[in-house]
Image (spheres, helix red, strand yellow):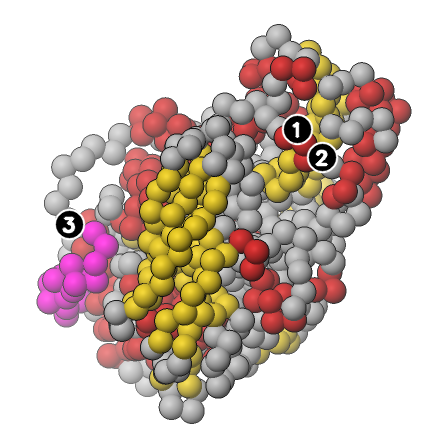
């Protein structure tokens, strides 16, 4: 169930049901039923945690309307303890550039949601990180709207194949964590339409049946109350026919403003709806038809997903099953990104790997991402050190946490190669959580004040490099990590993100060459902080400019350390024989991808559209499509990537519409956003 037209078949039935309801029953549909006290208690109770079972809202037993049963995400289903499949975080999956894989992951998540008794998955996060230090960047797919929208839409399609409502979040402009409850985001209307909302529309167009609003304000109005964002843009212009719900507990702050602004469901508990909303209607502050419209939306959506013919069995054996875990391993293997490999140090084999030193505390850590609302509780986690040990066989391994530099240097000097694992933990980045338990006080997550490695990790890399040239740095984290302090001292660099429950297995398969790395950076890595947009993580007001990530560096003519879409392989690829065309409805670019090495591998072909001749302000170029392709050693494959012309339009805020500039467009196709990796042509539109 994914197409809007399918849901609309239930409209008359939903309207008939709602017509039989009292005002109180209609408002009850709009009301979450999990008190904050219950949420907090479960977070402190052994064997329980946030969302350990689906959170209910609404329902009407008398009239046969099921409850909405919420399960969070996005790296798997949050429910249960020691059961769910933990996939790599969304940013890691973004690095695969594999739409088919993401749809298959969505299917697995949909199956596990059903097996837990849920019918609603709240884990399709498509926010754009304006600055890579955003603590929850790991929950989205990257920095580019085209890429993020395509991956989010794939997750939506997969989840909803199993009659689970997919909820897209957080609408909109949510990319600050510490100030998320207070900040008022300001931006130009063109920036709103061209940078921070297109990926939401991609998910709506894919059939997403629910949208969660964000905590922050936009242009002076809280997003959960925002008549323009919800009623005018989402429900009006985009034709969204599903459910709009608040983010939990702080998403609604005023009864009348929220319901008139288009908020259908207050989650996860009822504070401003319920009795207050009933009274607001009775006192004439809220028209009865506003309640009717929300109630029909809720009933229509629930009927469409729970009454669809579905003979499949969703038993508990699906949760954390072998097939889903194999999918998590595949995603981790496909995401790991090789950034540097001097002298062909990787893969490790033969004389290069008789004795290996593994250094760094993160090598022996269950490091699968933040500990906020996205935390999944799998049956096990394969740590990096464990994965290397399992794969190493007769290779001699030595491990040192790196806290004692003399011990680490001693391990390094006696080894053929050194693997150093460094980066972030759940308390460095992620959803900001603070709570008191008896006398203890704990804090997790938040935005990153620095994008660099810890000083002690830099010292560890330098100490090991001083005695052994074969240094392999494995980076763990949800977004950009700056490398200028130590990058030259590493012979090889792998970005592993947060690779999920099979992360150690996946990394070992890459290190030893069982799998060929095919991940590509879903964000740019600049050379310094000065190349990033200005940000104040504690701001009451924050301005979002037109450019961030690779578009900002392109505009300023600054070369990054590693460009967007970049990644190496154990083989080599050449893109040649570019062809560029348009039929007036879409723009297409084709090239021949030739594997010139001796190893089979996968390449990510990217198409960019350039706007150099545009009379209005535009980026230098924008990603407009991509395809991940497998090419056997010594073989070639012809690849075509297309983009709808509609996507090339700019938003004219004076005419309230998107317009196409009639001109010659530059079209690029190749292996990253860097000019050196792209073939160039032109089309006229």
Q: Nearer the viewer, mark 1 or mark 3?
A: 1
User: What residue is at 80 percent from the left and 26 percent from the top?
Assistant: 468
Point out the image quarter for the C terminus.
bottom left
Q: Residues within 10 Å of mark 2 (few under 14, many from 20)?
A: many
Q: Quadrant of residue 204?
A: bottom left
Asked whether the residues under the numbered discs 2 and 1 touch, taking CB atoms below 8 Å apart as contact, a structural biologist would say: yes
- Find the residue positioned furthest to the top: 394
Residue tagged 2? 491
Residue closest to the eye, 227 or 293: 227
Q: Can see residue 631?
A: yes
Residue closest to the eye, 510 or 217: 510
* Up/down of 418 relative to 582, above or below: above
Residue tagged 1? 345
Q: Can see residue 260?
A: no
Q: Main secondary structure of the magenta part?
A: helix
- Find the residue positioned furthest to the bottom: 654
Q: Earlier in the sequence, mark 2 or mark 1?
A: 1
Q: Quadrant of residue 549?
A: bottom right
**Is residue 8 located in the magenta-colored stretch of the structure?**
yes
> Residue 172, position in %: x, y?
47, 68
Marks 2 and 1, Cα distance to the nearest angstrom?
7 Å
Please tell me whether mark 1 sits on a helix, a strand or a loop.
loop
Q: Which residues are magenta?
A: 1-19
> Residue 216, position in %: x, y?
54, 69
Residue closest to the eye, 572 or 109: 572
Residue tagged 3? 307
User: What residue is at 42 percent from the left and 73 percent from the top?
Assistant: 665
> Residue 447, position in %: x, y?
66, 56
Please tell me whether mark 2 sits on a helix, a strand or a loop.
loop
User: What residue is at 43 percent from the left and 65 percent from the top?
Assistant: 681
Asked whether the residues under the numbered discs 1 and 3 touch, taking CB atoms below 8 Å apart as contact, a structural biologist would say: no
**Is residue 175 located in the magenta-colored stretch of the structure?**
no
């Amino acid at each position: 169930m994914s197409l809007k037209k399918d849901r609309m078949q239930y409209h008359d039935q939903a309207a008939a049901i709602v017509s039989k309801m009292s005002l109180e029953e209609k408002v009850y549909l709009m009301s979450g039923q999990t008190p904050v006290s219950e949420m907090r208690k479960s977070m402190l109770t052994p064997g329980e945690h946030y969302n350990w079972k689906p959170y209910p809202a609404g329902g009407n037993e008398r009239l046969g309307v099921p409850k909405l049963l919420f399960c969070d995400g996005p790296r798997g289903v949050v429910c249960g303890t020691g059961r769910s499949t933990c996939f790599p975080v969304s940013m890691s999956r973004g690095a695969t550039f594999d739409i088919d894989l993401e749809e298959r992951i969505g299917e697995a998540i949909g199956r596990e949601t059903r097996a837990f008794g849920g019918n609603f998955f709240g884990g399709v996060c498509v926010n754009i990180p304006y600055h890579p230090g955003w603590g929850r960047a790991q929950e989205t797919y990257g920095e580019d709207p085209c890429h993020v929208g395509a991956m989010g839409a794939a997750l939506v399609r997969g989840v909803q194949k199993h009659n689970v409502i997919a909820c897209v979040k957080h609408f909109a402009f949510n990319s600050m964590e510490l100030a998320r409850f207070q900040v008022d985001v300001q931006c130009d209307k063109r920036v709103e339409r061209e940078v921070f909302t297109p990926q939401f529309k991609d998910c709506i167009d894919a059939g997403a049946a629910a949208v969660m609003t964000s905590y922050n304000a936009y242009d002076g109005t809280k997003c959960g109350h925002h008549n323009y964002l919800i009623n005018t843009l989402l429900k009006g212009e985009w034709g969204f026919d599903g459910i709009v719900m608040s983010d939990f507990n702080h998403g609604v702050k005023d009864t009348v403003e929220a319901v008139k602004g288009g908020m259908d469901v207050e989650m996860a508990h009822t504070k401003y709806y319920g009795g207050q909303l009933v009274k607001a209607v009775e006192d004439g502050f809220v028209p009865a038809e506003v309640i009717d419209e929300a109630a029909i939306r809720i009933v229509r959506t629930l009927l469409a997903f729970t009454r669809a013919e579905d003979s499949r069995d969703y038993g508990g054996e699906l949760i954390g099953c072998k097939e889903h875990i194999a999918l998590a391993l595949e995603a981790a293997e496909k995401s790991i990104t090789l950034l540097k490999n001097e002298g062909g140090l990787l893969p490790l084999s033969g004389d290069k790997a008789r004795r290996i030193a593994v250094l760094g505390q993160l090598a022996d850590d269950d490091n699968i991402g933040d500990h906020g609302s996205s935390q999944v509780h799998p049956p096990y986690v394969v740590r990096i050190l464990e994965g290397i040990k399992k794969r190493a066989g007769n290779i001699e391994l030595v491990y040192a946490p790196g806290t004692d530099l003399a011990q680490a240097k001693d391990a390094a000097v006696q080894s053929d190669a050194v693997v150093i694992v460094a980066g972030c933990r759940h308390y460095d980045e992620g959803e900001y959580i603070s709570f008191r338990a008896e006398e203890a006080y704990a804090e997790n997550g938040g935005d990153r004040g620095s994008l660099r490695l810890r000083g002690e990790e830099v010292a560890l890399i330098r100490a090991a490099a001083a005695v052994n040239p074969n240094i392999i740095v494995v980076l763990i984290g949800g977004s950009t990590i700056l490398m200028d302090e130590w990058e030259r001292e590493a012979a090889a660099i792998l970005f592993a993100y947060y690779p999920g429950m099979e992360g150690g297995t996946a990394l070992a398969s890459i290190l030893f060459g069982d799998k060929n790395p095919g991940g590509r950076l879903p964000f740019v890595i600049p050379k310094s902080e000065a190349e990033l947009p200005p940000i104040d993580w504690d701001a009451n007001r924050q301005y979002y400019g037109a450019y961030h990530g690779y578009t900002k560096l392109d505009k300023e003519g600054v070369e990054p350390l590693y460009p967007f879409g970049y990644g190496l392989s154990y083989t080599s690829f050449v893109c040649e024989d570019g062809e560029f065309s348009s039929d007036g409805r879409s723009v297409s670019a084709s090239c021949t991808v030739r594997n010139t090495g001796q190893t089979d591998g996968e390449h990510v072909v990217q198409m960019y559209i350039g706007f150099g001749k545009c009379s209005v302000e535009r980026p230098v170029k924008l990603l407009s499509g991509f395809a991940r392709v497998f090419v056997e050693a010594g073989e070639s494959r012809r690849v075509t990537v297309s983009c709808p012309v509609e996507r090339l339009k700019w938003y004219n805020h004076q005419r309230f519409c998107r317009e196409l500039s009639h001109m010659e467009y530059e079209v690029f196709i190749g292996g990253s956003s860097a000019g050196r990796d792209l073939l160039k042509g032109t089309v006229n539109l």
